[in-house]
Amino acid sequence: MLIDLYQFIQEEEPTKVWTPKPETDEFKTKDSSYDIVDCDLKLGLRNAGNKKVDCKLEGIVELMIPCDLCLEPVLRKIDIDFHKELDMNKSMEEKIEELDEECFLIENSLDVDALIHNEILINLPMKVLCKDDCKGICRKCGANLNMGSCRCDQAELDPRMSKILDVFNQFKEV
């Protein structure tokens, strides 16, 4: 959804509120994608005068994210609280000088989907666990160890003994 900010500044209403929804049911990053289960957002714009607009985006987005250890899907709520004054007087060169990267502003328009995407990306948790004592998956067979143990040999060998183990494995093949 694109909102023409110059048209908004020209209108007589000083404040407008929208309830935006993402265009798709998936949130995609460079490496992965997550299902969007629910989205309850409120976008408010206020004409602050002198070609400035107060932009406020608040709400919650619920994503289904896989557990980092066992890969089971986990429902996570992402709280979004964005507030910024958008200055329409600044040129692109001035924004670059101030290191003000507003990729959600396309010339005179506010790209609401890009703003929502950026805010979700910023607020994504670094690590997601299905429970605090998640056991993960077996390194050999891939079984979910939260469901029960697997039949794999769990003996951990000393890495210094790996050359000797290679010699024994070589004789087994003969």
Image: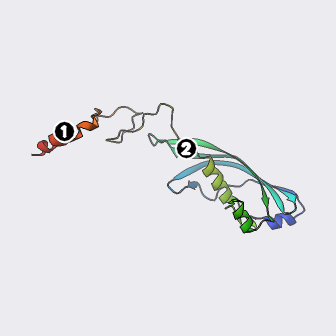
Rendering coords of residue 86 (x, y %): 78, 59
Q: Residue at x 47, y 30 (%)?
A: 133
Circle 2 residue: 126
Circle 1 residue: 164
Please tell me whether residue 106 is drawn above or below residue 53 in the rendered image. Answer: below
Rendering coords of residue 152 (x, y %): 28, 36
Please tell me whether residue 69 is drawn above or below residue 7 in the rendered image. Answer: above
Toward the viewer: 46 or 145? 46
Toward the viewer: 105 or 11? 105
- Name which residue type carries label 1: Ile
Which dot, 1 or 2, sits closer to the camera? 1
Q: Is residue 40 left or right of residue 31?
A: right
- Name which residue type carries label 2: Met
Nearer-N-terminus badge (1/2): 2
Q: Is residue 110 visible?
A: no
Q: Is residue 137 visible?
A: yes
Toward the viewer: 88 or 80? 88
Question: How dense is the environment of label 2, judged by Cα within 10 Å: few (below 14), some, or many (20 and up)?
Answer: few
Residues under labels 1 and 2: Cα distance? 40 Å
Question: How dense is the environment of label 1, judged by Cα within 10 Å: few (below 14), some, or many (20 and up)?
Answer: few
Quadrant of image for the N terminus: bottom right
Rendering coords of residue 64 (x, y %): 55, 46
Q: Is residue 41 left or right of residue 17?
A: left
Q: Residue at x 87, y 62 (%)?
A: 50
